[in-house]
Amino acid sequence: MEPDKFRESRQEINRMCRNVYALIDKKALEESKEGYEKVHERLDILKPQAEGEIQKRSVKNLGLKLKNLSTLIRKLKPKAGASRKAGSPGIVWNEERLAELATPFLEKVCQNMGTDEASAVCLGTTGKGIRPNYQIQFSDKSITSFSGSSHKPSQKPNAGKTKNISPPFSRAVIQNILAQKNA
């Protein structure tokens, strides 16, 4: 590529990167992602046109800058409550989503279910779904709520009377998922 045109393209990509850095500083997640995608498209167009060692090195450096932008964007968190306010129902638990939970987490849930084969677990639908709070319904109709991080019974009053829980999953479902993970 002609050196002057290459320099103009490189400078434009650098300007776009600076804009994305500014959006990241403002913690504007969606806008940062959009800006990143535009910069990435520009770099993909420039890459095959690079000729010679200097232009190729320049493209490589721009690629590293983009990788850094990607990392910074991944660290951004969505605005608090944004997904809930937008009418999102929260986490939707199904067997596939349940299988994404860590094996040790599911093992502790199973331990807390005890030997009651008719017990079932309902998971909390708020948060990120990594260590959700949960409640176990036992065959004698008693319900015990547990903290997802400590797996200890919750001491909060009315902890078992929440509307932000999933439908129940039987002990057999949990054991089946654990068997598949351990296979």
Image: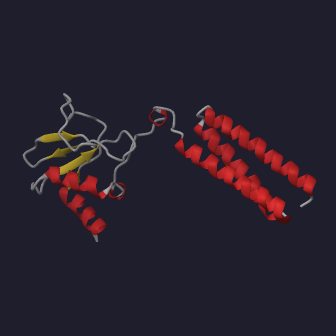
Residue at point 28%, 35% (across, down): 163
Q: Which residue is at 62% across, 33% downward?
A: 25
Residue at 87%, 51% in the rendered image: 7
Q: Where does the image place residue 47, in percent across and percent down from the top left?
A: 77, 61
Q: Residue 53 placed where, x, y %?
A: 82, 64
> From this viewpoint, which residue is outermost toward the left?
140
Count how many numbered circles sit on residues in the image: 0
Colouring of the image: secondary structure
The x and y percentages for residue 44 are 74, 58
Confirm whether residue 25 shows in the render.
yes
| Residue 61 sits above or below residue 53 on the image | above
For this view, does 100 lie left or right of residue 168?
Answer: right
* Residue drawn at 27 percent across, 47 percent down: 167
Q: Does 158 sit left or right of 4 as displayed?
A: left
Outermost residue, bottom side? 183
Work out whether residue 45 can be spotted: no
Residue 12 lies left or right of residue 133; in this view the side is right
The picture places residue 119, in percent across and down from the top left corner, at 14, 52
Q: Quadrant of the N terminus?
A: bottom right
Vertical position of residue 64 compared to residue 163: above or below? below
Judged left or right of residue 139, residue 170 is right
Q: Quadrant of the C terminus?
A: bottom left
Residue placed most toward the observer, 107 or 89: 107
Considering depth in this image, is 59 or 142 the residue closer to the camera? 59
